[in-house]
Amino acid sequence: MAIENTAVNEALEQIRPILQRDGGDIELVDIVDDVVQVRLQGHCAGCPGARMTLTHVVQQILQQACPDLKGVEAVE
């Protein structure tokens, strides 16, 4: 079953306030073969902890909303 944009966008709305507290944001770029591609913005874009944020925050929340998720990757 393919991951739906609606479910991903709803999950990103849960994540957004967490990132905005630190001056960042997140944008859905695409979903390719059940991998969600996102663009980190603001302070998150150049943050050394961005990879940890992607795996420990973004991916976990997205996997709860989309069990078929294979992964999350940041794109420029």
Image (spheres, grey):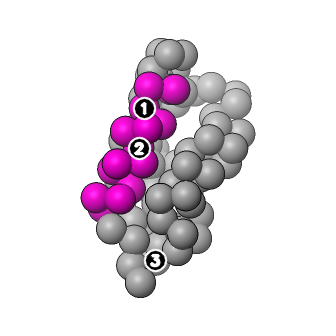
- Around disc 2, counting alpha carbons within 10 Å, would you say few (fewer than 14), some (14 to 19), or many (20 or more)? many
In the image: residue 46, left or right of residue 12: right
Check the image and report above or below for 6 versus 11: below
For the residue marked with disc 2, what is the amino acid? Leu
Q: Residue furthest left?
A: 6
Query: Mark 2 touching mark 1, by CB under 8 A?
Result: yes
Check the image and report above or below for 33 versus 47: below
Name the residue tied to disc 3. Answer: 33
Rendered location of residue 57, percent (x, y):
62, 41
Q: Residue furthest front?
A: 64
Q: Which mark is on residue 12?
A: 2
Q: Which mark is on residue 60?
A: none
Q: Residue placed at 35% from the left, 59% from the top?
A: 7
Q: CA distance from mark 3 to mark 1?
A: 24 Å
| Corner quadrant of residue 49 | top right
Of residues 54 and 43, the one drawn nearer to the viewer in this rendering: 54
